[in-house]
Image (tube, grey):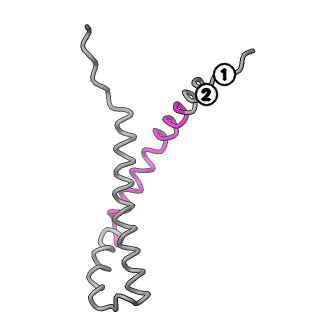
Amino acid sequence: MTEPTIAQLDAQIADLQRQRDLASLNGSKAVKAALVAGKVATLAEDLEALLPDLSNESVAAQQARNVISVIRNVRGLVDGEISRIEAMVEPQPEEPAA
């Protein structure tokens, strides 16, 4: 029995990663829904409205800015992940026959 080549192993890894990504699509969509529901939907804006009442040097202001940044960045990252996974399952345009 011959050992698989690096290219064959890479192809297997890519296929497994694709399967893993597709299996996590619904979970990613659930995370996205959670980030726009309830209190977390307005948390960044609510904290931002409080910043003028805080010293820029205070721990509270620093942590509020951190939370604002995380919430906004996570939303964008999750949206990007969903788009990437959905692109894998969308039909690719066929190239015209030569």
| Residue 6 spot, x, y in % from top left | 61, 26
Compared across the picture, whether 21 is left or right of 38 comes to: right
Q: Amino acid at mark 1?
A: Pro
First reached walking from the N terminus: tag 1 or tag 2: 1
The residue furthest top is 98
Q: Say which mark, if any, is on residue 47.
A: none
From the viewer's side, name the closer residue of 24 and 97: 97
Distance between mark 1 and mark 2 Cα atoms: 6 Å
Image position, residue 82 (x, y; %): 37, 46
Q: Pick whichever, 74 or 1, lies toward us.
A: 1
Q: Dot 2 surroundings within 10 Å: few (below 14), some, or many (20 or more)?
A: few
Residue under pointer 1: 4
- Residue 15, above or below 21: above
- The circle on residue 9 is 2
| In the image, residue 65 above or below residue 15 | below
Q: Is residue 10 left or right of residue 18?
A: right
Question: Would residue 18 be counted in the magenta stretch?
Answer: yes
Residue at 36% x, 39% y is 86
How far from the left and from the top, in percent, is residue 28?
Answer: 42, 50
Q: Which residues are magenta?
A: 14-39
Q: Please say if 49 is above or below 14.
A: below
What's the residue at 29%, 72% (across, down)? Answer: 42
On-image quarter of the C terminus: top left
> Is the residue under label 2 in contact with that under label 1 (CB below 8 Å)?
yes
Q: Mostly what secondary structure, the magenta segment? A: helix
